[in-house]
């Protein structure tokens, strides 16, 4: 009887981002990816959302290694936070490690062992024999990972697409997956579900390059700014090639764009001649038709280069009448409002804004239904779990697997926190672990749901602070009550309400004094209750009530 394999999902199931899973065998653990999710408007003040590391923290001494499938932030952005809890070597392609290194250095963990692996290389990580299979995605050098275990092969697709004409010629290695299927067999497949609702096949990334060449030709004489993900090295290559072919110099705007282009050029993954690059400060010295600026901020992120351009607050560059701004991306779910606001700001400054709804300036890096069916037909898995996607994506992918012949009883629809056990008897659920959101505000975690709830109340209803000094012995109000409000009512309405609130507080304190129950906690309670009751009755609002009671 072979030892079972346990798989724990800490993020990425039922959401876009926070991708993190743990494989366990013979008492040792391997972590697969550790990503972040970007906050939505319901998370005021939050910078990033991480997986809950409780399970890994409790089992830190059993972690044999961390495997990164590719270099996107939703798979690597939480690495620095994880390494504060767990000390283990990190495995990935040279580019993936290069992109992730800044996260490790920011955490002050420069002694972390980073192990670069090549295409089709196999590595022993604890009890796991891990094979790194090339896949095509929107960031170069991504991997599917085949974990050769006592229970057979557990294959994780990573983020992938089937691009027959990739920019760098590196295709998804279906042949190797087919060899595994025909030999050992794929016992369990976990596959990317992002585009499981989209019929057909994705177009090749090279098709976007054709669009850029056309746009650059049609807009000769005008300055062009292209915003895309700084990790999308293939997109950057195609934009740069189109710009250079049209006689333009390329300037880089945004810290991550500068860093990632330098890493990719050093690794030989990006071919931009040094004499084609100029500093963004030199752009104004060139004719508009001689310039192409590559910028970060295509998702409308606060303080990103493009968002600052749209607001007229970028210190290094300004948008001028007649400029062309191309957003070479789709908005991540939840970011639509921020992207729309950035586009509107650019248009107000006189720019022509081109995006994926009006021209083919973006192609997804995630497989659509036809490609997902192709992977299922090649891998022929005995069991299947859809990963990486919102719940509806996972559900549609599960149905696709059943349509492709996977036994319905061997298709599990999992969510964050679920554990599954792969054993001689099959695959089934095996308990749950904590997998809630860990909010990051600034550089540290610790922002809980209660803090977010308070922030939402402050944002939506405002705050009322009641300051009063009371003589505990006599029950006499020595000073106050002074009532301070922010974000509650318009100033013209405030005087009468504040005076009525003062009266209500004095009456409540007098009543408490008559009952002989004077103590600081009781005073705070009646002050909060009296103020809240009046505020709600008169305004139908529920601001945060903060009683400040001082004793004499």
Image: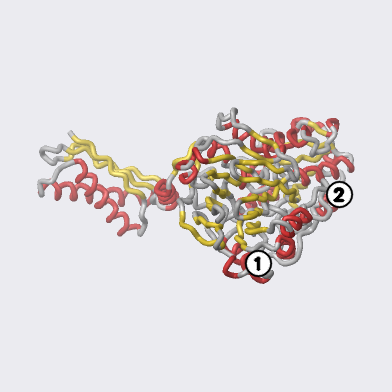
Q: How many numbered discs sit on the rendered protein?
A: 2
Image coordinates for residue 425, horizontal then vertical, percent = 55, 63
Q: Is residue 226 left or right of residue 7?
A: right
Image coordinates for residue 255, horizontal then vertical, percent = 67, 35
Q: Is residue 472 left or right of residue 419?
A: left
Q: Is residue 310 visible?
A: no
Can you say which quadrant of the picture contains the N terminus? bottom right
Q: Quadrant of residue 258?
A: top right
Viewer-proximal residue, 79 or 88?
A: 88
* Label pair 2/1, CB-CB below 8 angstroms: no
Viewer-proximal residue, 125 or 38?
A: 125
Q: Secondary structure at mark 2?
A: helix
Q: Is residue 552 left or right of residue 118?
A: left
Within 10 Å of disc 1 (Cα), the crowding (few <14, some 14-19, many 20+) is many
Q: Is residue 505 above or below residue 411?
A: above
Precedes in sequence: disc 2 or disc 1 = 2
Residue placed farthest to the front in the image?
Answer: 1
Within 10 Å of disc 2 (Cα), the crowding (few <14, some 14-19, many 20+) is some
Image coordinates for residue 191, horizontal then vertical, percent = 65, 57
Can you say which quadrant of the picture contains the C terminus? top left
Q: Which residue in the structure is indicated by mark 2?
A: 213
Image coordinates for residue 232, horizontal then vertical, percent = 73, 45
Residue 50: numbered disc:
none
Give the residue at x 78% y 57%: 359
Give the residue at x 24% y 45%: 524
Badge nearest the viewer, 2 or 1: 1
Give the residue at x 57% y 46%: 36
Q: Which residue in the structure is indicated by mark 1?
A: 401
Q: Secondary structure at mark 1?
A: helix
Colour scheme of the picture: secondary structure
Q: Is residue 324 visible?
A: yes
* Alpha-carbon span between mark 2 and mark 1: 39 Å
């Amino acid at each position: 009887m072979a030892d079972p394999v346990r798989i724990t999902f800490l993020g990425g199931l039922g959401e876009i981002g926070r991708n993190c899973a743990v494989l366990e065998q013979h008492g040792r653990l391997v972590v697969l990816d550790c990503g972040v999710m970007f906050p939505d408007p319901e998370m005021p003040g939050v910078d990033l959302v991480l997986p809950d590391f409780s399970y890994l923290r409790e089992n830190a001494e059993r972690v044999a290694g961390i495997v990164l499938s590719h270099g996107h932030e939703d798979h690597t952005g939480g690495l620095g936070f994880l390494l504060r809890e767990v000390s283990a070597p990190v495995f990935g392609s040279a580019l993936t490690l290069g992109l992730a290194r800044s996260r490790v250095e920011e955490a002050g963990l420069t002694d972390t062992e980073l192990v670069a692996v090549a295409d089709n290389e196999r590595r022993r990580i604890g009890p796991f024999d891990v094979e790194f299979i090339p896949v095509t995605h929107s960031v170069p050098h991504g991997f599917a990972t085949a974990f050769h275990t006592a229970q057979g092969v557990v294959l994780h697709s990573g983020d992938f697409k089937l691009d027959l004409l990739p920019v760098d010629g590196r295709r998804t290695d279906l042949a190797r997956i087919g060899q595994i299927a025909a030999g050992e067999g794929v016992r369990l497949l976990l596959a990317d579900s992002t585009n499981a609702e989209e019929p057909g096949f994705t177009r090749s990334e090279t098709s976007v390059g054709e669009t850029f060449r056309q746009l650059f030709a049609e807009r000769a004489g005008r300055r062009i700014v292209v915003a895309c993900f700084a990790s999308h090295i293939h997109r950057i290559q195609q934009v740069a090639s189109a710009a250079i072919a049209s006689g333009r110099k390329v300037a880089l705007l945004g810290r991550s764009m500068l860093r990632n282009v330098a890493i990719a050029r050093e690794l030989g993954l990006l071919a931009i001649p040094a004499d084609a690059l100029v500093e963004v400060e030199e752009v104004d010295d060139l004719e508009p038709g001689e310039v192409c600026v590559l910028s970060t901020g295509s998702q409308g992120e606060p303080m990103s280069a493009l968002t600052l351009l749209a607001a007229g607050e970028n210190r290094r560059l300004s948008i001028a009448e007649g400029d062309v701004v191309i957003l070479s991306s789709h908005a991540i779910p939840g970011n639509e409002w921020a992207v729309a606001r950035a586009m509107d700001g650019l248009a107000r400054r006189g720019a022509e804004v081109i995006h994926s709804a009006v021209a083919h300036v973006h192609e997804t890096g995630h497989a659509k239904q036809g490609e997902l069916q192709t992977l299922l037909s090649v891998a022929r898995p005995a069991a299947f779990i859809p990963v990486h996607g919102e719940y509806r994506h996972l559900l549609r992918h599960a149905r696709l697997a059943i349509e492709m012949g996977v036994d319905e009883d061997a298709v599990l629809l999992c969510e964050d926190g679920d554990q599954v056990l792969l054993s001689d008897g099959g695959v089934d659920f095996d308990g749950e672990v904590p997998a809630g959101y860990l909010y990051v505000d600034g550089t540290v975690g610790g922002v809980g749901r209660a803090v977010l709830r308070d922030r939402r109340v402050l944002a939506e209803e405002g705050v009322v602070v009641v300051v009063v000094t009371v003589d505990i012995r006599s029950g006499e109000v020595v000073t106050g009550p002074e009532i301070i409000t922010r974000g509650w009512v318009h100033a013209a309405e405030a005087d009468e309400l504040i005076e009525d609130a003062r009266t209500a507080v004095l009456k409540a304190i007098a009543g408490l004094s008559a009952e002989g129950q004077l103590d600081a906690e009781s005073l705070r309670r009646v002050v909060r209750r009296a103020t809240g009751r009046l505020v709600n009755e008169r305004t139908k609002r529920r601001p945060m009530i903060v009683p400040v009671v001082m004793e004499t």
